[in-house]
Amino acid sequence: EDQVTQSPEALRLQEGESSSLNCSYTVSGLRGLFWYRQDPGKGPEFLFTLYSAGEEKEKERLKATLTKKESFLHITAPKPEDSATYLCAVQPQYSTLTFGKGTMLLVSP
Amino acid sequence: NAGVTQTPKFQVLKTGQSMTLQCAQDMNHNSMYWYRQDPGMGLRLIYYSASEGTTDKGEVPNGYNVSRLNKREFSLRLESAAPSQTSVYFCASSRDFRELFFGEGSRLTVL
């Protein structure tokens, strides 16, 4: 059974305080690992797809990395507008996504 | 581009009532999905449609039916609503099992 575990459940940072969110997974034949951002009262917004171990992708203050067992979302010098829930999902070959429960990030000024 | 549009955004039902959530996408995607999101449970797949004319059960299909009306539209029906179906429902679409694009959600309360 495919499983996705995200940690921590919640994270509070000061503006400018860099940190990382973790997504550990077990899946039979990974086709892709996805990161989403979700603001309160909104639908998830796509951030990144990672396909193979060693791959990295960046967008503004966010960088996602992938190993064979986990993915990290690194947040460098976060700003209050980075506050959101970050969701990780894995996709087995030719199948649907399995989502983790998310990490709620709060960045204080 | 509107992307994925869901209606209604809010709905309150009494136990036993029926209703249909509507979803439309304008991205020419083949695949469409219905998820529910509950506190502490994450996003769970109810039904999906890999392409026009096909539908398949997801993780939590009981109590729901779906219709892929055409390539753009995918509806979710609750025939006899139960309090356990109180949730936020998200429709999503994708191009052939790639990244999902979500709607804004439909917040349903069943009393």
Image (cartoon, rainbow, N blue to C red):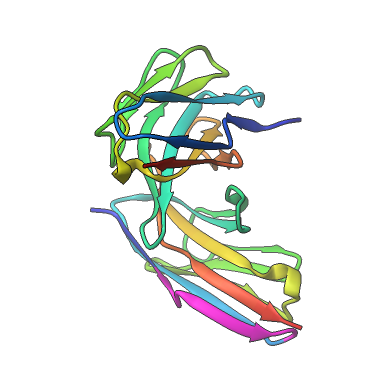
- In this orientation, which residue lies closer to the viewer: A50 or B17? B17
Which quadrant holds residue B68? top left
- In this orientation, which residue lies closer to the viewer: B107 or B40? B107
Locate the N terminus of chain B and report the quarter of the image it occupies: top right
Tell me: residue B92, above or below residue A59.
above
- In this orientation, which residue lies closer to the viewer: B75 or B92? B75
Residue, x 62% and y 32% (percent of image)? Answer: B4
Which percent across, then down, holds residue B98? 52, 39
Q: Could you tell whether A68 is left or right of B94 in the image?
A: left
Visible in this render: residue A105? yes
Visible in this render: residue A93? no
Is A13 magenta? The answer is yes
Locate the C terminus of chain B and report the quarter of the image it occupies: top left
Tell me: residue A80, above or below residue B65.
below
Residue, x 35% and y 37% (percent of image)? Answer: B46
Residue, x 74% and y 74% (percent of image)? Answer: A80
Q: Could you tell whether B88 is left or right of A3 in the image?
A: right
- In this orientation, which residue lies closer to the viewer: B27 or B108? B108
| The residue stretch that appears in magenta | A6-16
Tell me: residue B76, above or below residue B14.
above
Which percent across, then down, holds residue B47? 36, 32
Magenta-drawn stretch, dominant element (helix, strand or loop): strand
